Image (cartoon, helix red, strand yellow):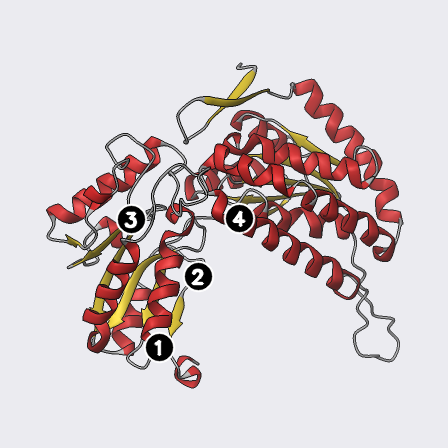
Amino acid sequence: MQDSVQLVTPVDGSVFAERAITTDEGVRAAVARAREAQIEWRSISVGQRAPLVEAFVDAMLAMGEEIVPELAWQMGRPVSSGGGELSGFEQRARHMISIADEALSDVRPELQAGFDRFIVREPLGLVLVVAPWNYPFLTAVNSVVPALMAGNAVLLKHSSQTLLAGERFQMAADRAGLPAGLFHNLVLTHSQTSGLLAGGDIDQVNFTGSVPAGRSIEQAAAGTFAGVGLELGGKDPAYVRRDADLAHAIENIVDGAFFNSGQSCCGIERVYVHRSLFADFVDGAAELAARYQLGDPLDASTTMGPMVHGRAADGVRQQTDQAFASGARGLVDGSGFERSVEGSPYLAPQILIDVDHSMSVMREESFGPVVGIMPVDSDDEAVELMNDSDFGLSASIWTRDVDAVR
């Protein structure tokens, strides 16, 4: 069994960090300590938990100046936009803390003669959070804070690409004064994670990642009766109706497709535009995409950093090349992005037209800076195409007529 994991940065291909893998004995000890800490934690009120979880949020935000460049080194997001994730982390965390008392309160249904009816919210026990690298703080906080506020203990298994993010969570928990053992950041292999789930020690697992990895999580937990929460792959569509604010749609759809180098769970991966707006939309989108500055994510002028690694970028290149071979046309001249070469994690943005649903770029998750755009003649056609996918997550409609959407 391997005894350490290396974090290879997409910035220059060097080893940025290396950490020892938690031993099996260490995992068992963490589970035991978490179980013990949770007994006392669950006994206090939601109102008593809130100040400690607020302190956890404060402690994380206090590390912001260190976290932003760490994110650039770990997964390639430019420092020019790295702070936005911490803003989202704070907004989500504080909102979830603020609603916890009401959301977790007992429920009393209507009175019925001869019955005392009530629903009591009880903590699950031990929650495992398996977090991804693409939004390592934003996705993890979605599970960590609700779990803690509900009276649970938490084990965090972060991606090997964002090892330092997991350590930041542990630092914040320790500095906030959360009870010892209540929160543990663990460095685990895939087999250890599966074994932990299969062993029946986990009461709930929340995972964000690919469909194959989600299937493995589900299979590992089978028969344990643990709750399983999965946010998996997407091929999220956008539809621009004929009455849309064109400039607004262009600006936000391009950002939705290319922010984080296209590596966003709910990123826009395919676009359908009413034919009356199609030419103007694709011209505006291509012009905006060509303005991205691809380069060193530690440079403040960079607006698009590398993808997480060269393999991911080459997968997008292959998908794009397949589309070209089937008749698609690219609207962005990649020669203007000098770092965008085969094998490199640095990949220029690309907008494709003359695409259809026979092409993988319109069917399979890209998770990179490429988007296909098709014209449509009606709302019905757009909806049919938007729904022509095995993937879910999110969709958007760009219109001035909200009633038409409903």
| Camera-nearest label, 2 or 1 | 1
Q: Earlier in the sequence, mark 3 or mark 4?
A: 4
Q: Amino acid at mark 3?
A: Pro
The answer to whether 174 is drawn above or below residue 14 in the figure is: below
Spatial separation of the CA atoms under disc 2 and disc 1: 21 Å
Q: Amino acid at mark 1?
A: Asp
Q: Is residue 383 left or right of residue 129?
A: left
Q: Are marks 2 and 1 in contact (CB under 8 Å)?
A: no
Secondary structure beneath disc 3?
A: loop
Secondary structure beneath disc 2?
A: loop
Q: Amino acid at mark 4?
A: Leu
Query: Number of marks in the image?
Result: 4
Spatial separation of the CA atoms under disc 1 and disc 3: 23 Å
Q: Amino acid at mark 2?
A: Ser
Residue tagged 4: 230
Mark linked to residue 349:
3
Q: Earlier in the sequence, mark 2 or mark 4?
A: 4
Q: Residue 186: horizontal and vertical position, in percent?
A: 65, 29
Q: Earlier in the sequence, mark 2 or mark 1?
A: 1
Which residue lies at the image location 74% right of the left edge and 57% below the top edge? Answer: 97
Q: Is residue 32 left or right of residue 374?
A: right
Q: Residues within 10 Å of mark 3 (few under 14, many from 20)?
A: many
Residue tagged 1: 245
Q: Earlier in the sequence, mark 1 or mark 4?
A: 4
